[in-house]
Image: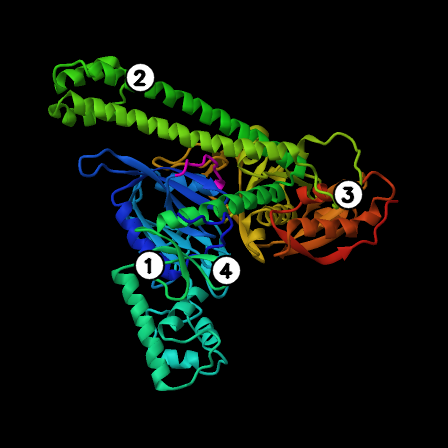
Amino acid sequence: MSQVPERSKTSVSGLEFRVLSRELARALDGAYVSNIYSVGESQLFRMRRPAKDGGEPSEVSLVVSPRLGAWLTERPARVETTEFTTALRSRVLRARLTRVEQVDLDRVLLFTFEGKEEGPSKLVLELMPPGNLVLVGPDGKVALALREARSGARRVARGSPYSPPAQSRASLETLTRDGLERALAGEETLGRALGRGLSIPRRYVDEILARASRRQDDPPSGTPEEADSIAAAVEELLGGIESAPYPCLVRTEAGGVEVMVSRPRSARVLEESPDLSPLLDKALYPELIAQEEGNAARTLREGSGESSADASERRAREYQATISGLEAKKAGLSKLSADLRGVASSAGGAPDGEGALEVARVSGVVPRDLLASLEGTAGKGPASVRSALFDRAKAAEREMADIDEAVRGLQSKLKREGARREPPGVRAISISRAKREWYEKFRWFFTTGGKLAIGGRDAQSNTALIRRHLQPGDTVYHADLFGSPFFVLKGGSDQSEEEVREVARATVTFSSAWKTGLGAADAYWVSPEQVSSAAPTGEYLAHGSFAIKGRKNFVAKSPVELAVGIDESGRVVSGPEESVMKVARGYVTMVPSREKPSDTAKKVLHELEPFVEGKPGPGVDDVLRMLPAGGGKIVRRRTDKRAG
């Protein structure tokens, strides 16, 4: 069997999605979601498949990755959970997968689930960069999105009707002779003509041209015979994929390892398989772990303002807790295996199948689902009962081996975290200032009226904010979109109109509106008695979420912008520009940008350094902590104010 490099850079095209949609629908027919975990942005659905042909129910993990694709894996399930995963669980847990389909021949898969909703929900995997996962409710509207988007071209936001992304190039499936001739016209080479005109990756361009006895560098002849030959090659390729797909890993001319679903003439086959999922699992799972976990850790660190050392320490604690949980599970499986083998040996002395079944019942250690399946086995004699018991013991032992593999991987990561140090080259001024105020663990600023506004950083701090610090006489703010913190204005019962605008602006700025690049968003405020931790009947509240009862007081189109400055004590402050200018020696005002958060923090620090004036000043991490999750660009500066 061939070895696939751990970083093979394999990509999945719409042609692979066509085969995958049928394969996953067949493999997961009637399966339901028993749990969902995450690896970064990717979701691992633990699917419980019904028993078939007299066998037992089984479980398998379905990987749905907005960066890599979708496939089945038998590897140990992950145990990480993100806010998106929690929200997804609340809607599709225990739901049954009824259909998997592809949109046209595009890199879009739709998974249809029948569950608690009144009608089917669809999870949409969009693999086109930057990738997205969208849950569409029975009404055809977006119920949940990994990435919200609001632009003139397309809107993906909660409550909006969902429509798949438009293809920018022609599809092979709808390609006409005129379309092919247009693609071939005006380009210097056949490879460029097909690559630019058709929505297919290079490996299939090579394959089509190889079947037409042409090469990428050949110039188009412009003859009808050439167009006929290429059209016939396209038809042959699509027909083979539809009727007899050939999943394989190939070595391309460029030297990379890629996946294909047709028997290639343009590349060397490294490995073939009856199904596509095992090949994708082998080629993509290492990339999934390396890429998605790295992205998740970086996003969490940048979003929370953690220093590298703090993030490393937190990850080490998480790895250790996971290892402890897996070792406890392994101990339970070890006991189960030993008990089942002991029962199987005792059942061997029974005169018939019913006697062997009675031994299993009396033992009290045989799982209920196994006892139920033994009912149909008993009539075949004691040997069949013993065989079923031994099979379950072996399954437990295989799961123990998987746990050992997972623990070894986690221990390796734990060792790396222990050796990790703050990366060199990050410029930071040493800091030594007074003890932080209690509110500085939250988002915070003081309004122009002198009131303290505090907001959550994540689900945990949202919960702490509402349960521990919300008091009568305060007001509570939330943005009207998914991925918003709660802000509490202390003493907000007599808030001014200016303070309402300031806190609403801070709320939308520190929400997902910043990361998605919105220019403005709506927010609303309510009184404390309208906020409840109890979900409405029949619904579920994710950790860090609260139900709002009664009338909401909306503040429309609050600008998404932030001022960051240095106050008289030398600490970094951020918030609406009006509030920051009252307390800051100097400050800058920013709007969202695609820049890296760390680069943004360095630029802000550079602008603010002149106002430290010899006192111990902030570092990059101090600035990061006061920024929203995502990069920004400076649009205004006020750096002429000095301490008196």
Disc 1 target residue: 18
Judge depth for marks 3 and 2 and give the one in front.
2
Circle 1 residues within 10 Å: few <14, some 14–19, many ≥20: many
Q: Which residue is mark 2?
A: 339
- Residue 577 higher or lower than 152, as above or below: above
Please state, as top left, top right, bottom left or bottom right, where the C terminus lies in the image. top right
Q: CA distance from mark 2 to mark 4?
A: 52 Å
Q: Is residue 416 visible?
A: yes
Is there CB contact under 8 Å for labels 2 and 1? no
User: Residue shown at 75%/42% (left/top)?
Assistant: 619
Tell me the distance, in whole angstroms, between the alpha carbons under discs 3 and 4.
43 Å
Name the disc covering residue 255, or none.
4
Q: Specify which label sits upstream in the sequence, 3 or 2.
A: 2
The amino acid on which the numbered mark 1 sits, given as a three-letter code, is Arg
Out of 501 and 455, give the one closest to the viewer. Answer: 455
Q: Amino acid at mark 2?
A: Asp
Q: Is residue 239 left or right of residue 408?
A: left
**Viewer-nearest of discs 2 and 4:** 4
Q: Is residue 226 magenta?
A: no
Callout 3 secondary element: loop
Counting from the top left corner in percent of width and height, residue 182 is at 41, 81
Expressed as whole percent of the image width and height from the top left, the position of residue 237 reads: 32, 67
Helix, strand or loop under label 2: helix
**Which dot, 1 or 4, sits closer to the camera?**
4
**Highlighted range, magenta:** 75-83
